[in-house]
Image: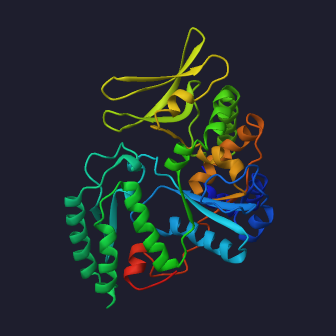
Amino acid sequence: MRGLQQLINTTEGKDFLAREGVFWQTANFLHALKPSAHSKINPRQSTSSLTVYAHQQPYLDYRYSVVSKFLLLKEIALSNPKIQTDFLWIDTDRAASDKLSLRIYWQLEDKQIPVRFAPPHCERHEFRFIKMDSKRLNQATRHLGSLVLQDRSVNIHYTTRFKQLEKYLLTEDTLSSYSRRISDFLLKQTLNYIPTPILVSDLIQSGALIESLELLINSRIEFINIINSRIDLLNHMNITTAVKPLPQNYLPLFYNCPVDNSRLRMQLASQHGRHYAVAINRFGDKYSFYLGKEKLILTEICASSRWSPDVTLPILLNDYYSGLIAGPSSCLYMLAFRSAMIKALGLTPIPILVSDYRKNQNPKFQSLMQTYLSAQTL
């Protein structure tokens, strides 16, 4: 199966991506931008008519594949100050979605040594519900400090720089806020740039996603069928889809169990013409939220504030933005979603700029944290 890089390397693949609104050159992407269909999504946004965003789970450190998103946002912000740049932090994802969410991997010679900062047994929880533990933070910070001290690539700036970082590493909070503060510090120090931060948990609280979600679940039958047909077509074209066919009881929702904070997939259940969003935890406890009969609404589940969106999040945000900077996997998701967005939801998909198609130009780059401690900038 061909991934995004393989498509970009062929004329046929480039033509296909261009028809799908996927760009790999910044200038062409910027030329395709149009004002968003809706007004700003968050009070932190400016009133700019053109707004570009990228999204990512909060990590404790970042490899180049993610840093490239920040670099592109900075490039766009500098090239046109009239374009607003936002970074959407997906603090509603499952913490174990990536190991970098829970630990820092320090590159020491030819080894990657993990240092876990997150508390134990939190892998199935969302970032916003994970409380950091002071004892673990102290142990992990000391361990990381000893590894950094052994690193020959770290120069004489080590002591001052690690001391500056240390206060962020030792601060107790939720994993969401903890990661965010470290990220902002590293971005400021290495890129001298911090895009406008927006948290998905804040969007949940504000109700900004409800209208799009209700449109999706009320168009779910056509939406599911179109996506499944699209997946078949992409498979026939030998293109990786990154998304599995959707079941007929699919809902774009998760629910966080109030017993152990586990993130549970919600499914549609119907009885006597009445529809429900249902989730079952590992103990067999059932959570059920009434959606309605004909027109489905999310009033009951939204009152709990414990729900979160799935990978369809860019669809829910589509009309609030002019463009999206996305990594390869997100681009592949959107290739599967695009037809359903147009035909089932009546949306005009915003253009996408691929974030990490270009090679890292800094041979010393290992991670954002190592860049900072080595007194480098990007």
Asked whether 8 or 182 is in front, the reply is 182
Q: Residue at x 34, y 65 (%)?
A: 104
Relative height, residue 49 to residue 330 (above, below): below
190 relative to 320 in the view: left or right: left
Q: Position of residue 14 (x, y in %)?
A: 74, 60
Q: Quadrant of residue 217?
A: top right
Relative height, residue 306 to residue 82 (above, below): above
The outermost residue toward the top is 272
37 relative to 95 in the view: left or right: right
367 relative to 230 in the view: left or right: left
Relative height, residue 129 to residue 102 (above, below): above
- The colour scheme is rainbow
Q: Residue at x 52, y 69 (%)?
A: 67
Q: Position of residue 263 (x, y in %)?
A: 41, 38
Q: Quadrant of residue 360?
A: bottom right
Q: Position of residue 182 (x, y in %)?
A: 40, 67
Instruction: Specify whether residue 101 is in view.
Output: yes
Asked whether 18 or 343 is in front, the reply is 343
Q: Position of residue 353 (x, y in %)?
A: 68, 62
Q: Residue at x 46, y 69 (%)?
A: 184
The outermost residue toward the bottom is 156
